[in-house]
Amino acid sequence: METQTTCLQCSTTLNPEATFCFNCGTQVKCKACQTSLTKGATFCTSCGTRITKQEASSIPLNKVEFEQKRESKKLNANFTDEVGFIFANALNAMIGGQVINKNPFHKTLNSPGSAPSKPTTLAIQPQTDNKISDVQYTEVLNDTLATIFKQREDGTLELADARVKEKTKFDKVKRLCLLYMYAQKTLSIETVTRQQLLNIVKAAKLGGNSDFRKYLTSDTGKNFSKRDNGDFALLGAGEDEAKNILAEISNPEIEHSNLKPRKRPVKAAKSDSKEATQGIPIPGSAQAVLQSLLQEQFFNDKRKLAEIVKHCKEKKAINLTSSTVSNVLKRFVKDQLLERQNSEDGGYEYWKKQIA
């Protein structure tokens, strides 16, 4: 049985079937006949095949050493610049809590000159019990983000799906704003304008801007900061909140809310008289009473306000205030049912308009 071999270049222990060293890439066996090579060989001593030299010195290597004495942990690693490039980008994404998504929110980590690899998503799970949660590579969160926003041809984002499992209208405004800022940040856009956020809220057809203004006031300095030029930049707490929101949206156990656009309450019709709201029995409204006086030819003669109120009380047994009657008379004058002129006591006199 053949024993393990050692690389003649870097002394790495190799599998007996290995043709090349997995650490430095040096050829250790002839590719034609699998005969072990001697150090510095140009031709195979068995079959005469020319050996293509690929010495470790031709491949730049980076060395990393790590040691943790208490727990006796030690790490020694050698890697090429290409591997270092990929590792550095991945580490940078982990530290920044960056989500690398597929179109439009993806950043592919490729080594120089290599073919594009499948987009990788780095999703940081929500923290619990003040402990840093494990980093897991998944495409769940970025897929969710990509369903909420879509990228136009000019690179700007627009709302594609406003369902964000909100609890209230105010919560919906908050979620859309945070997710929009977070989506922009994944595209390396650090700030957004107030108008951009407002456009997203309007696209969700929430109506009114009161909740939007209230949210910007309440969350500034907490989840995002406001720059001197008025633009907003997402803070670390805002990124965490956005990730928690995406986790909720992608969780099938959490149902979408049935929040519907808020309808304005139907206002009760105003009474024509103050007395009507007090429960005093009145055959009809003030307008109906004065309309009956028109039909009874009461206004064939000029009538003053006090006289009309007194007539309604004594002849109709209806108590109407002067202001209520005055408002109805103004409408009758406007509708050209009555005419009026100033009286000697500073008030008005009303009479029925004569039709020619």
Image (spheres, grey):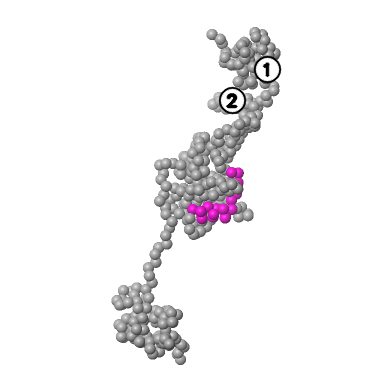
> How far apart are labels 2 and 1 at the CA level?
32 Å
Residue at 62 percent of width and 15 percent of height:
31
Q: Quadrant of residue 74?
A: top right
Q: Amino acid at mark 1?
A: Thr
Q: Position of residue 284 (x, y in %)?
A: 32, 77
Residue at 66 percent of width and 25 percent of height:
61
Q: Position of residue 351 (x, y in %)?
A: 41, 87
Could you tell me if residue 26 is visible in this image? Answer: yes
In the image, taking residue 315 as reference, residue 306 lies left or right, namely right
How many residues crowd mark 2 within 10 Å: few (<14), some (14–19), many (20+)? Answer: few
Task: Work out which quarter of the rendered image holds the N terminus and state it.
Answer: top right
Residue at 68 percent of width and 19 percent of height:
55
Residue at 55 percent of width and 27 percent of height:
70
Q: How many marks?
A: 2
Task: Work out which quarter of the rendered image holds the C terminus and state it.
Answer: bottom left
Q: Which mark is residue 75?
A: 2
Q: Position of residue 354 (x, y in %)?
A: 41, 87
Marks 2 and 1: which is nearer the front? 1
Q: Magenta stretch: give its range.
A: 187-204
Q: Amino acid at mark 2?
A: Leu
Q: Is residue 110 above or below residue 296?
A: above
In the image, taking residue 271 as reference, residue 103 lies left or right, namely right
In the image, taking residue 311 as reference, residue 214 lies left or right, namely right
